[in-house]
């Protein structure tokens, strides 16, 4: 069976998906996890019908469930089984399996997949609230080919117009970000709230204010309202709500930093909004190198070279990527008219050993 798997992978990398699937199916009799790879190949190649893809995923779930039932303490088997449930949109059972695993022993993969489950639930709500097209596509119509399937699909948040729908939708995104603060799809969906029409943007702000006034809102509601206020040009109110959110939830500085990074890397992103978010994160944790790095990047994009250099230098000592930061500082000091200092940073970035700067 190892030979069958090897041939399957060979045909896969040589661009022959149909032949790859033939060999992988035979190998999957011994290695059930390959059924997920088969489903991914079928989904990406477009050669399988929706019914055929679902049949493959059902087989994956059945085989992986048997494997998991035989060794429920095996973390890998639990994750694979939960992944098959996620692909089939059996979200309640997937969450149950993952939370059982977390109760026995936390694992980053449990949190990441649970966050994906929350995002899928958000997409379901959007599909029900709106016309269904975008949300149904994001929800996968009961069959997807990977947890990353949600990452490229920004749900049309304009469907969540009433207070109940917005509250429930934000609740799912909040749970996703509590589980995995770096959950890109959840951050993208927060941004999607600002990319609807100005009328929907204002309606969302009004709904969030109502929820906060009624005492039904969480720190995430303050955070989202603050973000939307910035994007709507109301800086004073934005700062108020962002500070309130960070005071209510100690985990939100990470979310603020990550959202600032997403906005800053977006070609159409509002750099002032990104800067406001990351400044709040830095104020909460002034020496956090990740937050300083994000703010340095945004200052750099704005052409604020001295401010960028200051943040990069503060981040340098604790950065997990000191060579990259040193190279950034070399480029910035060239722009600031300090070629000698730029040369030292460039030398430090190339050196295998730390170099003391004069």
Image (spheres, grey):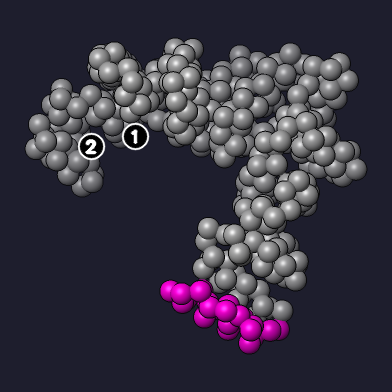
Residue 343 on the magenta segment: yes
Vertical placement of residue 81 versus 246, above or below: above
Image quarter for residue 87?
A: top left
Vertical placement of residue 241 versus 304, above or below: above
Task: Give the secondary structure at mark 1.
Answer: helix
Task: Give the secondary structure at mark 2.
Answer: helix
Locate the C terminus and report the quarter of the image it occupies.
bottom right
The image shows residue 347 at horizontal and vertical percentages of 52, 80
Q: Is residue 161 left or right of residue 289?
A: right
Circles 1 and 2, Cβ within 8 Å, touching? The answer is yes
- Specify few, some or many for label 2: CA neighbours under 10 Å numbering under 14, 14-19, or 20 or more: many
**Residue 149 in view, yes or no:** no
How far is mark 1 from mark 2, CA to CA?
A: 9 Å
Locate the N terminus and report the quarter of the image it occupies.
top left
Q: How many marks?
A: 2
Q: Which residue is mark 1?
A: 44
The image shows residue 327 at horizontal and vertical percentages of 56, 72
User: Can you tell which mark lies on residue 213?
Assistant: none
Earlier sequence position, callout 1 versus callout 2:
2
**Residue 64 in view, yes or no:** yes
Q: Which residue is mark 2?
A: 17
Q: Which residues are magenta?
A: 337-358
Viewer-proximal residue, 263 or 245?
Answer: 245
Viewer-proximal residue, 244 or 17?
Answer: 244
Q: Is residue 27 left or right of residue 105?
A: left
Viewer-proximal residue, 284 or 236?
Answer: 284
Residue at the outermost bottom position: 340
Vertical placement of residue 231 versus 129, above or below: below
């Amino acid at each position: 069976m190892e030979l069958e798997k090897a041939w399957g992978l060979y045909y896969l990398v040589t661009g022959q998906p149909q032949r790859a699937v033939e060999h992988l199916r035979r190998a999957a009799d011994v290695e059930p996890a390959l059924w997920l790879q088969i489903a991914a190949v079928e989904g990406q190649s477009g050669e399988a019908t929706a019914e055929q893809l679902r049949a493959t995923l059902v087989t994956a779930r059945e085989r992986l469930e048997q494997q998991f039932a035989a060794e429920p303490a095996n973390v890998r088997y639990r994750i694979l089984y939960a992944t098959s449930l996620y692909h089939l949109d059996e979200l309640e059972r997937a969450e149950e399996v993952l939370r059982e695993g977390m109760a026995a022993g936390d694992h980053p993969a449990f949190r990441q997949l649970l966050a994906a489950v929350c995002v899928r639930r958000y997409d379901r709500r959007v599909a029900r609230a709106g016309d269904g097209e975008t949300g149904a596509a994001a929800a996968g119509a009961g069959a997807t080919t990977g947890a990353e399937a949600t990452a490229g699909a920004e749900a049309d948040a304009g469907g969540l117009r009433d207070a109940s729908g917005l509250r429930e939708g934000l609740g799912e995104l909040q749970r996703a970000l509590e589980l995995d603060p770096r959950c890109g799809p959840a951050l993208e969906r927060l941004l999607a709230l600002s990319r609807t029409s100005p009328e929907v943007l204002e309606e969302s702000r009004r709904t969030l204010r109502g929820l906060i006034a009624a005492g039904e809102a969480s720190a995430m509601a303050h955070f989202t309202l603050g973000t939307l206020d910035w994007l709507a040009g109301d800086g004073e109110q934005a700062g108020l709500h962002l500070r309130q959110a960070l005071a209510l939830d100690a985990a939100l500085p990470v979310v603020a930093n990550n959202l600032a990074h997403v906005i800053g890397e977006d070609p159409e992103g509002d750099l002032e909004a990104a800067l406001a978010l990351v400044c709040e994160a830095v104020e909460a944790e002034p020496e956090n190198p990740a937050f300083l790095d994000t703010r340095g990047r945004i200052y750099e994009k704005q052409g604020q070279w001295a401010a960028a250099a200051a943040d990069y230098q503060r981040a340098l000592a604790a950065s997990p990527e000191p060579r990259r930061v040193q190279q950034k500082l070399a480029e910035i000091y060239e722009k600031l008219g300090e070629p000698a200092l730029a040369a030292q940073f460039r030398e430090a970035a190339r050196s295998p050993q730390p170099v003391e700067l004069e």
